């Protein structure tokens, strides 16, 4: 079978980062205030929402994961803005003649409450990816105090993306 037969591809992405003091909390390109002054630990800005979306995009085309393109041991990516990394991944996808049809994502966090920021996150991702706002779904949920998210040890995100051949 040749790849040309496939007009659509689905990708699934996931990311989780530990909450720690002394770091900014960035989700969907929005800097938030955690009630305990915690942020996400990581080599870049640790934006789990954007990382999950990038992994979904790369996975849809079997291109590996974000660690392949932005290795955590490469000092060049230290403190990198994940929205800029997303631009690079979208460029790679477009160079391979695919376009984003839609994204569905969810952030799992006990605190802070994310509802007031969801629209801005969606707008940031839409603008960065140059896709219609209606094609970017961002939701938030708690883990009902279960698991690392529920114990506020970290925040995770899941994303599903649909690509269409150009």
Image: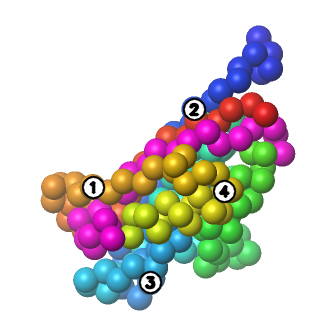
What mark, if any, has residue 141 been given in the picture?
A: 1
Q: Earlier in the sequence, mark 4 or mark 1?
A: 4
Query: Circle 4 is placed at which residue position?
Result: 129
Query: Circle 2 is placed at which residue position?
Result: 10
Q: Considering depth in this image, is 55 or 42 the residue closer to the camera?
A: 55
- Residue at the extreme left: 145
Tell me if residue 151 is in the magenta stretch: no
62 over 42 or under it: above or below: above
Q: CA distance from mark 4 to mark 2?
A: 17 Å
Q: CA distance from mark 4 to mark 1?
A: 24 Å
Q: CA distance from mark 3 to mark 2?
A: 33 Å
> For the magenta stretch, what is the residue range?
95-116
Percent across and percent down for residue 140 are 32, 57
57 over 39 or under it: above or below: above
Percent across and percent down for residue 19 are 35, 73
Q: Earlier in the sequence, mark 3 or mark 4?
A: 3
Circle 2 Cα neighbour tier, 10 Å, few/some/many (<14 / 14–19 / ≥20): some
Q: Earlier in the sequence, mark 4 or mark 2?
A: 2
Q: CA distance from mark 1 to mark 2?
A: 23 Å
What SS does tag 1 mark? strand
Query: Circle 3 is placed at which residue position?
Result: 23
């Amino acid at each position: 079978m040749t790849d040309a037969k496939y007009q659509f591809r689905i990708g699934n992405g996931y990311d989780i980062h530990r909450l720690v003091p002394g770091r900014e909390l960035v989700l969907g390109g929005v800097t938030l205030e955690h009630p305990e002054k915690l942020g996400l630990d990581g080599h870049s800005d640790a934006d789990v929402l954007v990382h999950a979306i990038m992994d979904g995009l790369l996975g849809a085309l079997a291109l590996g994961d974000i660690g392949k393109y932005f290795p955590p041991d490469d000092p060049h990516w230290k403190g990198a803005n994940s929205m800029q990394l997303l631009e690079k991944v979208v460029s790679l996808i477009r160079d391979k003649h695919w376009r984003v049809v839609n994204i569905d994502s969810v952030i799992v966090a006990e605190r802070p409450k994310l509802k007031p920021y969801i629209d801005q996150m969606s707008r940031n991702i839409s603008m960065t990816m140059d896709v219609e706002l209606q094609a970017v779904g961002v939701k938030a949920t708690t883990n009902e105090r279960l698991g690392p998210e529920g114990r506020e040890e970290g925040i995770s995100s899941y994303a599903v993306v649909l690509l269409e051949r150009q």
